[in-house]
Image (tube, grey):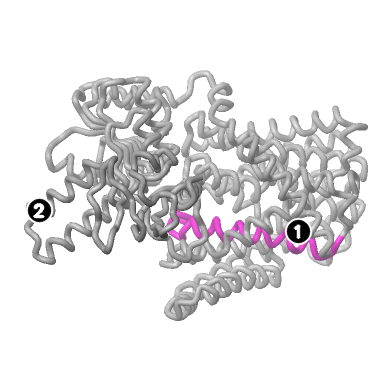
């Protein structure tokens, strides 16, 4: 077991590093690791009873994390998707696929059972990719998650029906169905009661102890306990973990819980994808490559077309792009299908030759899904000729046609809404865009100028009248998205004033270079406001405080750049950029910088900002001719690598 884990983790380390370098999804890397280290390829990993259990825990942790994002109120809003679209998708896909399997010579009962298994999609891959792409709460993301939740319940039912159809079970299918659904309701009610009365008290007690270790332990216990209880009921452990996460999504500790279990989730989920790859016979691709390709295309085209058609027919989130992106997200086979086919082969319900080909086709469909999801916008655009998207653009364009000198707000979250309230009070016209359909739906009930859409699309910016706008405010919470919106906006209008909100100032220069007239770092601005209030409360004159605040803003927050990070060992921010550190270098008598002017040292050329030079407890007034002396403390801000280079020059002249 330990040797297997070592080989898998070491191989994954190398492959995932390569995949990230070429910008391919990590999921593909894990699947490829399993394919090549498995028994049919390099045969580095032997079969182990513990490995599938560890791999299943990865799906459990993933579904728990996903449940944290979907609060009970959001799930209630999705009930029509879960039980409406979900049931229709499973039924239609099952009957179509079962009919095709019957043509291949399978008995009707076995064809229906396998058709139901092939109708299921990959909860692990789809939910992980939608989360990483930030599309969980998009229209197609909610369609996909809702259907996947229904499929998890169906998967449990199908696994219980295998011995029944094989003539080995003592229970008819019409009895197994209500029993499974009854267990699901019982589980939900039990978890609902625990989340209302027991878990809040537990988390409060643990949080009061201020022990990170206890908090992590409690989070792990909850995940594993709910999975174990669900397993005892004969249901999918992943389903129980999702319900537990969904009920905890209402608590104040949701973000901390998610952060604590993320490392366990990602590692265990990687093992799951590796275990899926190990099930496939690599030699089969050489001998039956064309058959596998044909089966893969047939499976994905049938499932994708059925989902897209159902989304359009039902009329909910029914524009063409949403329909096709929902179909692409659910077109692949699922991990439960592997377990179902293994049981069917064991019970002689599925010929081994056909089963191996279907396993390979299901694997291939899962392999290409991350790439399809990333390419989904362009694929969906090509699959329909007259998209409702154009109708939406026409409606937005008609609404903004009479507006001139207005404000365009991209991102209508907390910051965007605050700006909108001030504009409304001053009776200044504005129009807002946001890609969260739930938020837009809520805002549209009271505001007619908030529209759904991706602000990075140039045609959407044109529809809101950016060419006639007086100001563009980019208030999205991700700097990379803000940069893309900024570039698209500058292609349409070179003159409009653009204000960009960011979390910090790590990419301020890049945003300025791309065309932003002003960049407001949210954290620095809030720090500035807090400091100004403190000065006023200490009795300093209001005009003096305001002068100091204006000076800091004029110097682009230079005074506030960086801070002492203390014992933190994470030097990368949430967007993958190096954090700006604050570091003081004390000059000894033999330091290279002693007796030299700042102009000769060229510190800022190394990528740092010189915040101050302190001599005997006092800040020196700095200019290029300022000469450093022994005992001076040089305070620098910048990324770690630049600070280390600067310290090396100050002390050793390198």
Which residue was labeled with disc 1? Answer: 173
Q: Quadrant of residue 352?
A: top right
Q: Position of residue 390 (x, y in %)?
A: 42, 22
Mark 2 and mark 1: Cα distance apart in space = 80 Å
Q: Quadrant of residue 188?
A: bottom right
Give the residue at x 51% y 46%. 576
Q: Nearer the viewer, residue 123 or 578?
A: 578
**Is 152 situated left or right of 278 in this image?**
left
Q: Nearer the viewer, residue 472 or 111?
A: 472
Q: Quadrant of the N terminus?
A: bottom right
Above or below, comparing residue 632 to residue 302 in the picture: below
Q: Nearer the viewer, residue 603 or 297?
A: 603
Going from N to C along the chain, the mark reached first, 2 or 1, is 1
**Is 169 situated left or right of 13 in this image?**
right
Disc number placed over residue 544 in the picture, else none: 2
Give the residue at x 65% y 35%. 22
Give the residue at x 6% y 58%. 541
Disc number placed over residue 344 in the picture, else none: none
Dot 1: within a 10 Å radius of its alpha carbon, few (fewer than 14), some, or many (20 or more) residues?
Answer: some
Residue 626 forms part of the magenta stretch: no
Give the residue at x 22% y 49%. 621
- Type of secondary structure dominating the magenta stretch: helix
Q: Position of residue 210 (x, y in %)?
A: 45, 77
Please report contact status of discs 2 and 1: CB closer than 8 Å, yes or no. no
Q: Is disc 2 placed on a helix, strand or loop?
A: helix
First to last magenta residue range: 48-77
Dot 2: within a 10 Å radius of its alpha carbon, few (fewer than 14), some, or many (20 or more) residues?
Answer: few
Q: Is disc 1 placed on a helix, strand or loop?
A: helix
């Amino acid at each position: 077991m330990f040797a297997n884990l070592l080989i898998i983790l070491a191989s994954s380390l190398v492959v995932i590093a390569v995949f990230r370098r070429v910008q391919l999804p990590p999921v593909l890397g894990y699947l490829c690791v399993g394919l090549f280290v498995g028994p049919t390829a390099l045969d580095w990993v032997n079969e182990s009873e513990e490995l599938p259990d560890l791999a299943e825990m990865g799906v459990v942790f993933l579904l728990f994390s996903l449940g944290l994002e979907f609060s009970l109120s959001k799930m209630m809003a999705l009930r029509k998707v879960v039980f409406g679209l979900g049931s229709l998708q499973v039924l239609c896909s099952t009957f179509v696929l079962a009919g095709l399997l019957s043509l291949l010579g399978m008995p009707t009962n076995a064809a229906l059972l396998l058709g139901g298994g092939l109708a299921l999609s990959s909860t692990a891959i789809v939910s992980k990719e939608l989360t990483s792409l930030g599309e969980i709460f998009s229209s197609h993301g909610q369609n996909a998650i809702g259907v996947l939740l229904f499929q998890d319940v169906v998967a449990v039912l199908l696994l219980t029906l295998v011995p029944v159809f094989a003539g080995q079970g003592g229970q008819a299918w019409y009895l197994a169905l209500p029993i499974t659904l009854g267990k699901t309701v019982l589980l939900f009610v039990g978890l609902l009661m625990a989340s209302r009365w027991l878990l809040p008290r537990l988390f409060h007690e643990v949080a009061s102890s201020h022990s990170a270790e206890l908090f992590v332990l409690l989070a792990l216990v909850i995940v594993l306990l709910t999975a174990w209880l669900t397993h005892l009921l004969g249901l999918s452990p992943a389903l129980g973990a999702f319900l537990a996460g969904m009920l905890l999504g209402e608590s104040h500790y949701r973000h901390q819980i998610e952060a604590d279990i993320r490392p366990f989730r990602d590692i265990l989920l990687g093992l799951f994808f590796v275990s899926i790859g190990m099930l496939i016979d690599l030699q089969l691709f050489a001998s039956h490559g064309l058959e596998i390709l044909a089966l893969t295309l047939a499976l994905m085209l049938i499932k994708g077309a059925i989902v897209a058609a159902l989304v359009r027919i039902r009329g909910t989130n029914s524009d063409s792009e949403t329909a096709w992106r929902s179909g692409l997200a659910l077109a692949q086979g699922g991990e439960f299908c592997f377990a179902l086919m293994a049981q069917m082969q064991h019970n002689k319900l599925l010929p081994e030759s056909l089963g191996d080909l279907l396993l390979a086709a299901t694997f291939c469909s899962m392999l290409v899904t991350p790439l399809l999801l990333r390419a989904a916008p362009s694929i969906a655009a090509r699959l329909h000729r007259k998209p409702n998207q154009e109708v939406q653009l026409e409606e937005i364009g008609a609404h903004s046609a009479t507006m001139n000198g207005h404000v365009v707000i991209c991102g209508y979250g907390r910051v965007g809404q605050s700006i909108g309230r001030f504009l409304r009070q001053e009776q200044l016209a504005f129009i807002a865009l946001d890609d969260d359909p739930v938020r837009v739906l809520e805002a549209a009930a009271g505001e007619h100028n908030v529209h759904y859409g991706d602000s990075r699309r140039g045609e959407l910016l044109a529809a809101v009248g950016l060419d006639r706008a007086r100001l563009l405010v980019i208030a999205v919470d991700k700097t990379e998205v803000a940069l893309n919106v900024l570039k698209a906006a500058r292609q349409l209008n070179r003159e409009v004033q653009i204000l960009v909100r960011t979390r910090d100032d790590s990419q301020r220069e890049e945003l300025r270079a791309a065309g932003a007239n002003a960049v407001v770092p949210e954290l620095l601005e809030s720090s500035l406001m807090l400091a100004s209030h403190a000065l006023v409360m200490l009795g300093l004159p209001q005009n003096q405080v305001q002068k100091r605040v204006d000076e800091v803003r004029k110097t682009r927050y230079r005074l506030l750049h960086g801070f002492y990070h203390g014992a933190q060992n994470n030097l990368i921010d949430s967007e993958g950029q190096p954090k700006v550190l604050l570091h003081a270098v004390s000059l000894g008598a033999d330091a290279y910088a002693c007796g030299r002017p700042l102009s000769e040292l060229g510190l800022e050329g190394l990528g740092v900002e010189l915040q101050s030079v302190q001599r005997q407890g006092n800040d020196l007034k700095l200019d290029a001719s300022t000469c450093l002396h022994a005992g001076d403390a040089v305070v620098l801000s910048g990324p770690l690598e630049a600070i280390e280079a600067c310290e090396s020059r100050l002390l050793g002249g390198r």
